[in-house]
Image (cartoon, grey):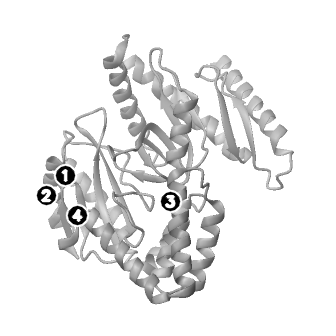
Amino acid sequence: MTKKEFEKIGKALLPELPGFAVKGHLLFMLPVRQVLRGICFEPSGFDRKAFYVNVFVLPLCVPTQYLYFNFGRRVGTGWSSDAPDVYSELSLALRREALPFLSRVEDLDDFIQLAKSFSRANPRTREAIAYALARVGEVDKAIAELDTLLAMLDVKVPWQLEMAERANALKSLLLHDFASAQKQLQEWEAESIRNLGLEKFR
Amino acid sequence: MATKVMQTVYALSLALANYADVALGADSRAIGRGVFELAAMALPVTKVKYAGTVSELTRTVNVADELALAARRAAAAVGPGHGPVYGTKVHAAFANEVRALGNPNVRAEVSFLNGRIVEYCTPGSVRVDAVWFAPNNEVLTVFDLKTGSATLTPQRILQIQQQVGNPVPVIPLRP
C-alpha cells in the first residue's frame, strides 16, 4: 500500500479521532510539542493489500530522523485493505487499543512513567528516559540514568558510539550549565520535529 | 504424533541440558549464554545462541515450534517451486500465517535500525520475518524464513543483532 492510500484511510478515520491530524501514513495527536503521540500505517513487504498499524509515543528531545515504535505496540496483528468492514474494524480497534494508550501520555512526565514499563535492556529506553528527565529538570535522576546508559553501551558499534558521545555531551552540560542543557534539548526537539516534517503542527 | 512428541521432548531436554551446563557457571541469576539444538523439531539441525531463564527457553522452543509449523503451512499453500518469486510467495504466505496466529507478541515483518523498531523501508534498517517480543517490547527471538538454497549466514545474524541492539537469538525457519 502507498502513503496516499494510507492517507485516505487516515482521513476516513479522522472523524472518529478528535484532536488528531493526518500526514501521509501518520495519524497524530495535536499539538506536537515535547512528545509525539501517533498511529502509523506500515505496508507489508510482500502483500500489496496487507498492512500493519503501530501506536506509539516518542520524546522529541531525543533527536531522530525517522519514526520509531519502541514505546508502542501494534494494533491487531495485521490488516488487509480488501477485508470487509476494514474501516469499522480498524476504527473500533483504534478506539479500544490506541486511544487509551495515547491518552495516558499528556506530557513528558507521563512519558517517563510509561517508558519505565518498557525494556531497559535496550539502551534506547534508558536514553529516552534520561533525556526526558533532563528536559523536565530532574537533573540528578537524568545524570544517574545517563551513567547507567553509558555503562551499557558498546562503543565499538557505531550507532552506540554516537549515543555515548551525545549522552556524555548532555551530561557535561547538565553538570556545568543547566540553561545550556535545556537549550540543547529544545534544539533537539526542533530538529526532530523538522526531520519528521511536523513543523506546521507545533 | 507420538514421534513428534518424543522429538520435542528430546529437543527440550537437550536444550535444558545445554542450558544447565552454562547456567551453573558464575552467573548467580542463573542466566547464561548457551547453545542448544532445535534438531528434533520441524527445523533442521541449527545451533542457536541463547541467553535467558529456563522458563523463557521453554517458551522459545514452543514459539519456534509454532512458527516452524506456520512456515510449513505457508510452503504447502504456495506449492512446489524455486527461485526468488517462489521465495517471495512463501514469505507472503508465512507473514499471513503469523498474522493469523493472533499472538500480539509474535509479530510478522518487523524492521530494526540502531536499536529502534522502525517502519518498513527506513534507510539502513533490516527487516526480519517474525519476532517474538516480551510484553515490554524486549526482543526475545528473531525468526528468519529461508527457502531454497538460501542460508542464514553469520554475517546476517550479526547484522540483525546489531540493528536490534542486543545479541538476541536468531533462528532460521526452513519449511
The residue at which mark 2 appears reads as A12
Horizontally, residue B22 falls left or right of residue B108, namely: right
Mark sitting on residue A106: none
Amino acid at circle 4: Gly
Horizontally, residue B61 falls left or right of residue B25, namely: left
Q: CA distance from mark 3 to mark 4?
A: 23 Å
Label 4: few (<14), some (14–19) or many (≥20) C-alpha neighbours in 10 Å: few
Q: Are marks 3 and 4 on the same chain?
A: yes
Horizontally, residue A156 falls left or right of residue A21, namely: right
Q: CA distance from mark 2 to mark 3?
A: 41 Å
Residue B137: x and y, percent?
A: 51, 55
Task: Name the secondary structure under disc 1.
Answer: helix
Q: CA distance from mark 3 to mark 1?
A: 42 Å
Mark sitting earlier along the chain (4/1): 1
Q: Are marks 3 and 1 on the same chain?
A: yes
Q: Are marks 2 and 3 on the same chain?
A: yes
